[in-house]
Image (spheres, grey):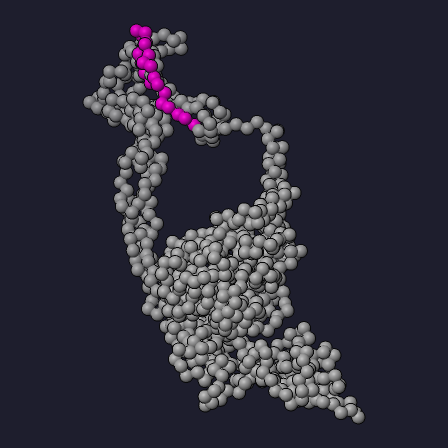
């Protein structure tokens, strides 16, 4: 409910902004001002306009380049980028029969927003690209090029489009939503598509772009809007979907949190330390060898034990005791080793006793090999193993037997924690720089030693050094089969072979001039064409109609299309709604029953297959007159159509027959307007869009799914007429212009979205048809709900 109130407030604010206080400058683009049109553009001059409040400019000469600067283009595109609501406004006075562009935002052949008026076909056209990046043209039959002033407004709001002319609503339609995602090098032109095409002739005033759907109100203040736009509705639906998504995820997280909290109620949690398989609680202390350790915030903190030198009585002395880290006062340590009084030992009564020579063990060595040691009362043989008598050397320390007694020594890779080296700790050779790892390796510390690990792309020579791995020679590389592999330091690089293009990892065959119309380059200069095209570069459309590949029903005629064809019902027939491919669904039109006949009142209409006949009732004397455009035409009368001076009609026994005027180019009085092919002037020729071909006036051709015609030096193009398709999922194959029905929704580029058909994503969330999301656990997998079907693919923005 809060969202609805907020949307209503924003809606009212926008209306007030337009009606009461004018348009916010941040939402307005004054095209004349941004292009600085007053700064001497060739072919453009300032003239009086429809009113005197703003400047008006005459676009006349054909040699002109009215194009915005890079800075101005970026400012304009920044306001339009990714917007779903905007309005194009213009006040124009266009020359009769002129076909020209009012405003064009395009990059190369990609028209993102272009408003065009055709005086040749009496049409207003809006060209744009859909959110699926498909070109789209919306055609509005209307005569704008009549040398009269007109206010024109085209407003888009999501999938809703409105055309106003002179403050009158002319058309209102539901269309494919446009995409306002502009790439680099996008340019903005005024009064032309480019330097050679779409030249507008006439006067323009107040050309503006408003980033709002109801911008026509600023042009016509008396108009008002009482209902929210489609974008308002779509915005509310989107917000509801987002809230539904957030609610589902939050509910899931809350449920998991409650489960964890229920478990926590039954336990006490604290940070602990695990050392050598023993678990210590927070702040608990312990001794690890000759270190004092404490568990602090889950981390074991250890420091060496600090020893205070002991003060011993006269009958004892400081000595290390096995299992202890510090020296202690000792009277005697073992039977034959005395601490203070030679040849004495500590008895069970804890008093010193003299060792009798009789208890000394018998030695098995010569007397010359026997030694008398100062701290022992019994002799020992030279080379005696003192360590075998027992020692106090702990882990990482080893006992060595010297000539006069035992001693502890730290093992390699460890250092002593006390003077007698009975306790030792590991040396981190890597951190202290005490290792021998050479180039192309990384040092890793191990207990008592270290390891030299090879960098990626290198192989081991010995324990301390690595050399480069030749992935190219071993075949362990990522190069395409049509690429060359080059070994580099620490890796390799790939380069496509001559005749192929790509990054080396993926190489595609390169064809000179590229394969056209969806053809595939399979090897250098070899194209495989899609169905419906032929030629070395697939540049030639196969005319299925003239080649005899197609046989349409007798009630239909074959119409060739780029890469395809369709059977169109002949005059006198119409499709029954089944739209069969060969025209079998064409059925006769009952001109008599529907009133679509020209029979006069004194005759009777008889329906015929594919036509009708006006018959005179028996016994009557009929005039044979005809009714045409609610006017009586006498039998035998010939006249020129009021709205088409190039068509001649005649009345023959109640039937009206019209045909195009026959052109006789040898006749000096031939009407060049109706017979442009008879115009010999070079100024009447036209240049093809590629700039390489010239056409005589009257010539026609197909370019980018448009039918183009040269008329007196001007090129006029309009969308090809496609046969209707009645199916849920459609696809326009690459190189073709008209949609075809497909059964797989994931292949379709156009879908009749049914919001009642939903999908369930990997979270178990319900998604409306038309919604999209990034698949959980991925960054580049884009999923869409298409009428109950989940379709996932790699997002092209990630490539």
- For the point 39% across and 58% down, the residue is 38
In the drawing, does residue 177 fall left or right of residue 393?
Answer: right
Q: Position of residue 742 (x, y in %)?
A: 59, 68
Compared with 628, 346 (above or below) is above
Pick the residue in front: 577 or 330.
Answer: 577
Look at the image and say whether residue 305 sits in the magenta stretch.
Answer: yes
Pick the residue in front: 796 or 307.
Answer: 796
- For the point 55% across and 28% down, the residue is 269
- For the point 40% across and 54% down, the residue is 72
Pick the residue in front: 682 or 475.
Answer: 682
Q: Position of residue 405 (x, y in %)?
A: 27, 22
Pick the residue in front: 723 or 35.
Answer: 35
Q: Position of residue 59 (x, y in %)?
A: 42, 66
Compared with 529, 283 (above or below) is above
Q: Is residue 489 visible?
A: yes
Compared with 57, 781 (above or below) is above
- For the point 53% across and 61% down, the residue is 151
Which SS does the magenta portion mostly show? loop
Look at the image and say whether residue 455 sits in the magenta stretch.
Answer: no
Magenta extent: 300-320
Q: How many marks?
A: 0
Which quadrant of the figure contains the C terminus? Answer: bottom left
Q: Is residue 279 visible?
A: no
Q: Position of residue 355 (x, y in %)?
A: 31, 11
In the drawing, does residue 667 fall left or right of residue 330?
Answer: right
Which quadrant of the figure contains the N terminus? Answer: top right
């Amino acid at each position: 409910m809060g969202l609805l109130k907020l949307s209503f407030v924003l809606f009212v604010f926008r209306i007030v902004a337009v009606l009461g206080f004018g348009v916010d400058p941040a939402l307005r683009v004054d095209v004349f001002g941004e292009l600085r049109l007053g700064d001497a553009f060739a072919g453009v001059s300032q003239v009086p306009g429809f009113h005197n409040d703003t400047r008006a400019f005459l676009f006349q000469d054909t040699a002109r380049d009215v194009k915005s600067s890079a800075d101005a283009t970026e400012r304009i595109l920044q306001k339009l980028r990714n917007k779903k609501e905007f309005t194009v406004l213009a006040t124009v006075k266009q020359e009769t029969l002129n076909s020209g562009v009012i405003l064009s935002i395009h990059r190369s052949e990609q028209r993102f927003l272009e408003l065009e008026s055709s005086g040749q076909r009496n049409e207003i056209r809006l060209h744009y690209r859909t959110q699926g990046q498909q070109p789209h043209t919306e055609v509005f039959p209307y005569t704008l090029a009549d040398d009269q002033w007109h206010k024109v407004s085209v407003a888009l709001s999501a999938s809703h489009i409105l055309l106003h002319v002179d403050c009158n609503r002319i058309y209102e339609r539901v269309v494919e939503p446009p995409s306002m995602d502009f790439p680099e090098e996008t340019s903005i032109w005024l009064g032309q598509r480019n330097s050679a095409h779409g030249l507008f002739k006439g006067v323009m005033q107040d050309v503006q772009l408003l980033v709002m759907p109801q911008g026509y109100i600023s042009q016509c203040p008396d108009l008002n809007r009482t209902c929210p736009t489609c974008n308002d509705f779509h915005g509310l639906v989107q917000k509801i979907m987002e809230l539904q998504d957030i609610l589902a995820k939050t509910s899931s997280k809350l449920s998991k949190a409650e489960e964890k909290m229920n478990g926590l109620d039954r336990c006490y949690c604290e940070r602990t330390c695990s050392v050598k398989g023993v678990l210590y609680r927070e702040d608990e202390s312990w001794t690890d060898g000759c270190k004092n350790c404490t568990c602090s915030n889950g981390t074991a903190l250890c420091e060496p034990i600090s020893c205070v030198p002991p003060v011993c009585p006269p009958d004892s002395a400081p000595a290390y005791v096995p299992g202890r880290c510090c020296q202690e006062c000792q009277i005697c340590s073992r039977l034959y080793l005395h601490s203070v009084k030679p040849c004495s030992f500590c008895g069970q009564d804890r008093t010193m006793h003299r060792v009798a020579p009789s208890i000394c063990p018998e030695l098995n060595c010569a007397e010359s090999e026997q030694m008398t040691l100062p701290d022992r009362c019994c002799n020992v043989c030279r080379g005696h193993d003192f360590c075998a008598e027992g020692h106090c050397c702990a882990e990482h320390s080893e006992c060595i037997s010297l000539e006069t007694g035992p001693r502890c020594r730290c093992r390699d890779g460890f250092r002593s924690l006390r003077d007698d080296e009975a306790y030792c700790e590991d040396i981190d050779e890597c951190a202290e720089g005490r290792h021998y790892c050479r180039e192309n390796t990384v040092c890793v510390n191990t207990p008592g030693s270290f390891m030299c690990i090879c960098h990626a792309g290198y192989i081991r020579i010995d324990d301390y050094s690595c050399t480069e791995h030749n992935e190219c020679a071993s075949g362990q590389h990522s190069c395409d089969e049509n690429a060359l592999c080059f070994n580099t330091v620490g890796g390799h690089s790939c380069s496509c072979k001559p005749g192929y293009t790509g990054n080396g990892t993926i190489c595609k065959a390169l064809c000179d001039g590229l394969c056209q119309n969806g053809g595939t380059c399979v090897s250098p200069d070899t194209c495989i064409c899609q169905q419906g095209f032929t030629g070395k570069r697939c540049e030639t459309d196969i005319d299925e109609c003239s080649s005899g590949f197609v046989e349409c029903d007798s009630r239909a005629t074959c119409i060739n299309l780029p890469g395809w064809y369709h059977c169109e019902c002949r005059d006198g027939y119409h499709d029954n709604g089944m739209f069969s491919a060969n025209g079998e669904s064409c059925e006769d039109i009952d001109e008599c029953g529907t009133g679509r006949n020209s029979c006069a009142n004194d005759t009777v209409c008889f329906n015929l297959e594919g036509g009708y006949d006006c018959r005179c009732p028996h016994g009557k004397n009929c005039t044979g007159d005809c009714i045409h455009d609610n006017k009586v035409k006498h039998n035998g009368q010939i006249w020129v159509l009021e709205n088409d001076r190039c068509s001649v009609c005649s009345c023959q026994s109640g039937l009206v027959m019209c045909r195009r005027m026959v052109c006789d180019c040898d006749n000096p009085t031939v009407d060049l307007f109706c017979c442009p092919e008879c115009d010999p002037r070079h100024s009447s020729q036209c240049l093809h869009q590629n700039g390489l071909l010239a056409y005589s006036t009257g010539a026609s051709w197909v370019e980018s799914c448009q039918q183009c015609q040269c008329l007196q030096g001007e090129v006029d193009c309009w969308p090809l007429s496609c046969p209707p398709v009645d199916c849920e999922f459609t696809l326009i194959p690459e190189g073709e212009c008209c949609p075809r029905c497909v059964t797989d929704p994931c292949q379709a580029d156009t879908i009749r979205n049914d919001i009642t058909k939903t999908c369930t994503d990997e979270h178990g969330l319900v998604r409306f048809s038309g919604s999209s999301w990034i698949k959980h656990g991925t960054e580049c997998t884009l999923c869409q709900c298409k009428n109950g079907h989940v379709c996932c693919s790699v997002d092209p923005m990630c490539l």
